[in-house]
Image (cartoon, helix red, strand yellow):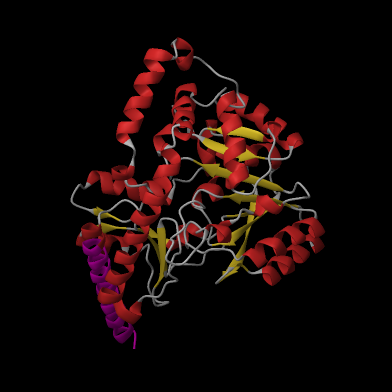
Amino acid sequence: MNYDALFSSVGQGLQQSAIRQMGTVAAQNPNLISLAPGYPDPGTFAWDAYLEITEALLTQRGRATLQYGPTQGHPPLVAACVDLLRERGIAATPQELLITTGSQQGLDLVARVLLDPGDVVLVELPSYTGAIAAFKNVQASLVGIPQQADGIDLEALDDTYRRLAHDGRRVKFLYLVPNFQNPTGLLVSLAKRRALLEWASRRDVLLVEDDPYGALYFEDTTTAAETRPIKADDTGQRVIYLTSFSKTLSPAFRTAIMVAPPALADRFEIGKQAADLCTSNFDQAIVLEAINRGVLARQLPLLRQHYQRNRTVMESALRASLGEAATWVTPRGGFFLWVSLPDAVDTHRMIARAVAQGVIYVAGGAFFVDGTGANTLRLSFSLATPEKIVEGVTRVAAAVKEELAALGAAALVGR
């Protein structure tokens, strides 16, 4: 049977995640050092605490722990999340909250509830591939805005909006990751965050703020105050805020928070009913106990120290192995280091060389919606040990040097 004719226009247009694709490559070759996926280090998981919590839930709480729960979320966890958000400066009511199955579900709900085919979404250049996929899957039109050292270029943002409005295009929202962006690691300045709120109000546009890394700031360069969410100052109800426990407790719990104005939160909840009815009640109960028992609070300082060390190791290895052939901005938090190579290098084409050297990364072009970024790549320092980070970067450097040598030879042949 020919199934091609059965696919919807969305089904025909689905594209594999470049990040997941590299994960598959790594899984097929256990000798590869993977600097591709943004996975937390499982060595940081609070295993003993989770064992105690799980045993208590199954022996003391009864079978209701394994039952369906409300679509909005486990009510005690919703209440606990209100308190957590308040600590981040966000004054939210339970009616504005939705517990989602990972932040990726939040992005999918935003796409399905707010976007019609042809609607414009403004995104950073580069931007998170999971968000790009969610918005493209509903046939939205994605337009990229370049970034500066302190975040998105505000002048380019408004110029782009005015051009689109002049052409009769409908801009629904701006999507951004202000804290240690995936993939660049950039931190949006506080002044720029306030300016973004003013811009959104003036242009009558929503902001979708994705914040999985805000708690993972590196204390050698950054303070908690510098990661204040845009949502914390959202007096006009223009920000949809997403955050997750995946990077701080465990991604396997698939438990995340979505905050939106009540009228939107209600629609997102209805959309979630059609997707999964509810996020795992058991997972939510574990997360709640981790909050109540202080596990989350104890984890955060340890995680900051751990990933800060890995970041420093990766930077030192890059300087030693590539010198001036690579440039990057030191990440002040999060999981990623964003590398730019000479313009002639195509990092997607170079993957074959990297695999031959025994290492894998994510080619930067996947994060751009305008076809640029071919000379960039994303390295993750979150999963590998310091020793493997050094060896992995050394192997990446060997692939880069091979590529540069080949390009030099090709240039000579072309003369």
**Position of 413 compared to 227: left or right?**
left
Looking at this rendering, what residue extends furthest in the bottom direction? 415
Q: Main secondary structure of the magenta part?
A: helix
Q: On the rendered image, what quadrant is the C terminus found in?
A: bottom left
Can the viewer see residue 255 in this picture?
yes
> Hey, which quadrant is residue 98 in on the image?
top right
**Position of 356 compared to 63: left or right?**
left
User: Which residue is at the front of the view, 313 or 303?
Assistant: 303
Q: On the rendered image, what quadrant is the N terminus found in?
A: top left
Magenta residues span: 390-415
- Residue at 41% x, 19% y: name it: 57
> Hey, which quadrant is residue 316 in on the image?
bottom left
Residue 259 screen position, x and y as percent: 65, 40
- Residue at 71% x, 64% y: name it: 195
Residue 158 screen position, x and y as percent: 73, 66
Question: Would residue 20 be counted in the magenta stretch?
Answer: no
Residue 275 screen position, x and y as percent: 57, 27
